[in-house]
Image: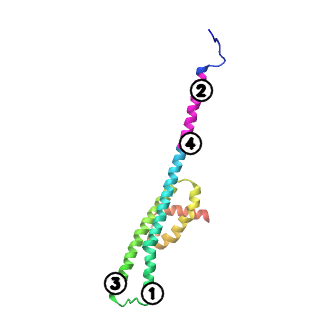
Amino acid sequence: MLCPTLPWNPDRTIALCAVLVALLALVIALWQAFLQRRTMRLQIFENTFREIRDQEVKFTEDYMLPLIDLEKRLKSPTTNLANPEESVQITDMFRTLNHVRHLRTFSFFNTVEYLAFLINKGFVSDTRLESFFGPAFVFWYEELLRKHDEVAEKDPKKYEEFKKLYRRLKGKSC
């Protein structure tokens, strides 16, 4: 026997090192999963918020700017509403704009409702994002929903998540 008693057992030490390396790998994998989940949620939030901004731009381009042009045309001294053709044309333009307004506000508020759902249900749970973007939600409610979709504002079944988020954000700011 060359080595009758060793102060330590090499097999046990190697096994212990292997367990420690495996535990460290598990901790690193869990941390990466947490970071990936957080990144995915942030990406969903960012994509939805970008879609809302795009909807705002479309609303302005497709409804607000043509409405301003039509109002200018009505105030123009060359406009003759006594002329039946011109009167019908202007009426048709208003109907078309009203239809565009309904389509754009519906699309816009459905996207806002989806983002509010994500926040309210905890899919996007970073309170810093909620407080940073909170003023935008308040603006959308007070300046857009109230002015462009009064029926939806009064209907408790429409945009429930958006209204719930608005009340919570408004409660924090008061």
Mark 2: which amino acid? Answer: Leu
Are there few (<14), some (14-19), or many (20+) residues within 10 Å of tag 4? few
Numbered disc 4: secondary structure = helix
Q: CA distance from mark 2 to mark 4?
A: 23 Å
Identify the image quadrant of residue 32: top right
Residue 152 visible within the image: no
Which badge, 1 or 4, comes first in the chain's sequence? 4
The x and y percentages for residue 109 are 45, 65
- Mark 4 sits on what residue? 31
Are there few (<14), some (14-19), or many (20+) residues within 10 Å of tag 1? few
Q: Please name the residue shown 50% across and 54% down the image.
A: 43
- Mark 2 sits on what residue? 16
- Highlighted range, magenta: 12-32
Q: CA distance from mark 1 to mark 4?
A: 64 Å
Circles 1 and 4 in contact, beta carbons < 8 Å? no
- Mark 1 sits on what residue? 75
The x and y percentages for residue 156 are 46, 65
- Mark 3 sits on what residue? 88
Q: CA distance from mark 1 to mark 2?
A: 87 Å
Which badge, 2 or 4, comes first in the chain's sequence? 2
Q: Residue furthest top?
A: 1
Q: Please name the residue shown 61% across and 20% down the image.
A: 10
Residue 34 visible within the image: yes
